[in-house]
Amino acid sequence: MDAKIKAGIWVSMAIRLSDIAGRAAAVLRKGDPDSGGILCVLHGRAGVQVLSQIRDAEGRPAWLRATGPGAVDQETADGYVERQVQRDPDLWVVEFDAPDLQPPFEARIV
C-alpha cells in the first residue's frame, strides 16, 4: 500500500515538475496542508479539463477526469470547482498550462 503524501508537499512537487517542463502553474486555492484533496485544472488548446484526486479500489492514488472525457469551457470548469469547494473546504485547486490536456506530473487516470 502506498503511503499518502501530504497535500502541500504534493502540490509543491507538481508545480516544480510543471516548471521543469516549461509549463506555467499556479495555486488557485490552498487547502489543508496535510490531508486536503486536490483538483488540477488543465488549460489546453481545446479547452479546460479538471482532474480530481481519488484512490482506486485497491487504495492506489489515481486521477479522475471530473469534467468528463473531453475538454469543457472555462465556465463549466469553474462551476465544477466551485461546487467541489463548497462540499470540501480543505480542497486545493491547482492550475496548469497543458496544451495537450495531459498533466505535467506522473498521473494514472481512471
Image (cartoon, rainbow, N blue to C red):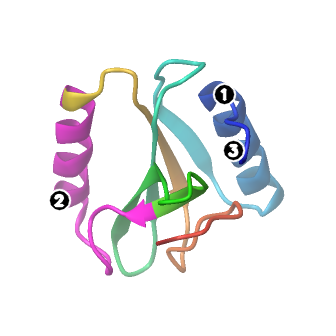
**Mark 2 closeness class: few <14, some 14–19, many ≥20 residues within 10 Å:** some
> Per the image, is 69 magenta?
yes
**Residue 82, above or below 51:** above
Chain-order first, disc 1 or disc 2: 1
Please tell me the numbered disc located at residue 76.
2
Residue drawn 35% across the image and 66% down it: 48
Image position of 75 with respect to 48: above or below? above
Q: Which residue is label 1 attached to?
A: 6
Single out the mark in the foreground, 1 or 2: 1
Cα distance, mark 1 to mark 2?
29 Å
Percent coordinates x, y for residue 88 in the rendering: 29, 27
- Which quadrant would residue 18 be assigned to in this image? bottom right
Magenta-span inclusion, residue 29: no
Above or below, 65 against 34 in this view is below
Q: Residue at x 44, y 79 (%)?
A: 45
Q: Are marks 3 and 1 in contact (CB under 8 Å)?
A: no
Q: Nearer the viewer, residue 58 or 46?
A: 58
For residue 12, above or below residue 34 = below
Where are the magenta residues, as a range? 64-86
Name the front one of labels 3 and 1.
1
Residue type marked 1: Lys
Mark found first going from the N terminus, 3 or 2:
3
Q: Amino acid at mark 2?
A: Thr
Name the element at disc 3. helix
Which SS class for mark 2? Answer: helix
In this picture, residue 88 sits left or right of residue 56: left
Q: Residue furthest right?
A: 20
Total numbered labels placed on residues in the image: 3
Amino acid type indicated by mark 3: Ile
Label annotation for residue 15: 3
Q: Which mark is residue 66?
A: none
